[in-house]
Image (cartoon, grey):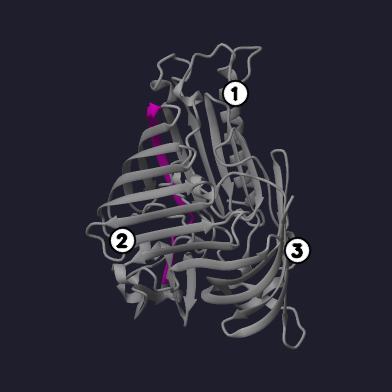
Amino acid sequence: MTRLARLCVIVFLTHICASTATAQTPPGQSAQMPQDAPPSASSMLPFQDAYSVYRNLESGNFFWGGLGITYFNNQLFYTVSLAPELAFGQFGIGIDLNLRISQSGQLRQEDWNDGISSYLRLIRYARYGFKQEPLYARYGQLDAARLGHGSIMFLYRNNGSYDARRVGFEFDMDFGDAGFETIVSDLSTFNIVGIRPFVRPLRNSGLFLLSGLEIGATFVGDFDSNSNLQAGSEATLTGRTENGQAIFDLDAATRRGSFLAFGIDAGLPIVRLPMINSDLYLDGVGYVGYGVGVAAGISANIQAILNVLVVSAKLEQRLFTDRFQFAYFDAIYEQDRFRAIGGGAITRANELANTKGGAGVYGELGGSILGIIRLYGSYQRLYATPRAGQLHLAARLQSNDLPVLLRADYFKRDLGVETDLFTVDDRSLGQAEFGYLPYPYLLVSVLYQWSFTPVRGENNTILGYRPLERIEPRVSLNVRF
C-alpha cells in the first residue's frame, strides 16, 4: 500500500467519524456539548490515566540552553544545546538543537545523516492541546503514543534512537457522541499507521453511568518491508541466539507482507465523583496471521487529596493464545522490528511467531505529590510464559523552590527473572539526570542515557540498531517565563 493510499484511508475514516458525530447533534447545538444535554458520566471531571498524571499536562514558556561534554561509547564530544519550549494558549512548540563537536573540531556525523530530515527534526514537536482533550494534534517526536487502552499500541516512541529520529503525527478529536484517535509514525514513509474510531451510543440517554459507555475499534498497520519477516522453517535457523532470541538465515527467511493488527474495546464508568473516578474496560485484539488476546481491567483515579496527592492506577487480567503479545507497538518497537546480525537476523515478528499462549497480569500506578514529585510504574507478569516480563519506571523531582533536580525514565521488556530488571541491554531504553541549581536559573547536572544508534549499510540504509551509552556532564541555563 502506497503512502498516498494509507493517507487516503485515514482521511476517509476520520471524515466518517466526524460526519457521524455531527449527524447526531441537533441543529443549532454544539457537537461537543449540547446546551440541553442531561448530566452524564462523560461530562464529569475528565479521567486521567496513570501516565498522564506523571507527565503533567501543564504548559508554559521555558528556555533551556547548555554547554557540556558528551561521551558516546567512550568517544568524547563537546556539546552546545538549545531546547526552548513556547506555549501560546493551546498551541505549543519545542526546539531541539544539539551541536556535538569532536576533539578534531568536526560535527558528529551521525547527527546529520538523514539529509533534510535531520533539519526538520530540529522542531522537536509542535502541538495543539494534549492527549485526551477534545482536540489534540502533535507533529514531530512522539514519545508516548497510545491508542485506546493500549492493548495494541502503548507508549510507543518514534525517537528511541537520537540518530534516526522520525517526524510523526498524532491527531485526535472527541465530539462527545463519537470521535477518533490517529497516529502516523513517520511522515516520510507512513510505515506505521493507526486509527481508533469510537462512539458513546448512550451519551444522551440520561442514564448516568451508562451514558459514559464507550465502544471503539482499533487498526494499526506496519507497512515496513521487514515488519513481518520470519524464519520460514527450522532449516533457516543459524543455531545462534542473542538475549534468548533465535538468529535466522536472512536469505532463507519468509516475508509475509505487512503486519496488521485489529482490536475492539469497550469502557464503562462505574464511579464518577468530584474526587474519585473509576472505569471497567474490556479489550479484544488479533494480529493477522498470528494469535488473539483478551484483556479485562479496572482503572481508578483519585484527585487532589487535601490538595496534596493525585493518584491513578490500573489492574488488568490478560489471556492470550500462542503467537500473541499485548502492546506489540511499545517503546522500543522501532529498534526491535529488524536487526541484521552477521548474515542473519532477529525480528520482532519472528519473536511473536514463537510466543506461547497463557495468562498474566498487568498493573500500573502514577502519582503526583504537591506537583513536585511525580512517579510512574508499570509491570507485566505472565504466569507461564518465559522471558515475558515488562517493566517501566519513571520519576521526576522538580520545583522552582528546590535546589535539586531529578529526572529518570527506564523501560525494559522480555524479562526472564527479576534479577534482570536493571541489566541494560538491547531490550532496554532509559535515561537519568541529576542536577544542582546554585542559582534558580543555572543548572549543573549529569545526564546518563541508554538508547540506540542505527547500523547503516549501503545508501545509508538502516540495517538495525545497537545499544548506545551516553554520559554528559553539563552546565545549562534554565529560565521559565
Q: Secondary structure at mark 3?
A: helix
> Which residue, given by chain and number where applicable, does mark 2 sit on?
355
Sort mark 2 into few (<14), some (14-19) or many (20+) by Cα contacts within 10 Å: many
> Which residue, given by chain and number where applicable, does mark 1 sit on?
32
Mark 3 or 1, closer to the camera = 1
Please name the residue shown 53% across and 46% down the image.
194
Please name the residue shown 65% across and 84% down the image.
76
Q: Could you give the CA–CA distance between mark 1 and mark 2, rounded to whole angstroms? A: 43 Å
Q: Residue 286's spot in the image, x, y percent?
A: 37, 46
Q: Secondary structure at mark 2?
A: loop
| Residue 83 in view in this figure | no
Between discs 3 and 1, the one toward the N terminus: 1
For residue 7, which quarter of the picture?
Answer: top right
> Which residue, given by chain and number where applicable, does mark 3 sit on?
119
Mark 1 or 2, closer to the camera = 1
Please say if 160 is above or below 340.
Answer: above
Residue 130 colored in magenta in the image = no
Q: Residue 282's spot in the image, x, y percent?
A: 34, 37
Marks 1 and 2 close (CB-CB < 8 Å) = no
Please say if 426 is above or below 209.
Answer: below
| Residue 31 in view in this figure | yes
Marks 2 and 3 close (CB-CB < 8 Å) = no
Q: Residue furthest left?
A: 384
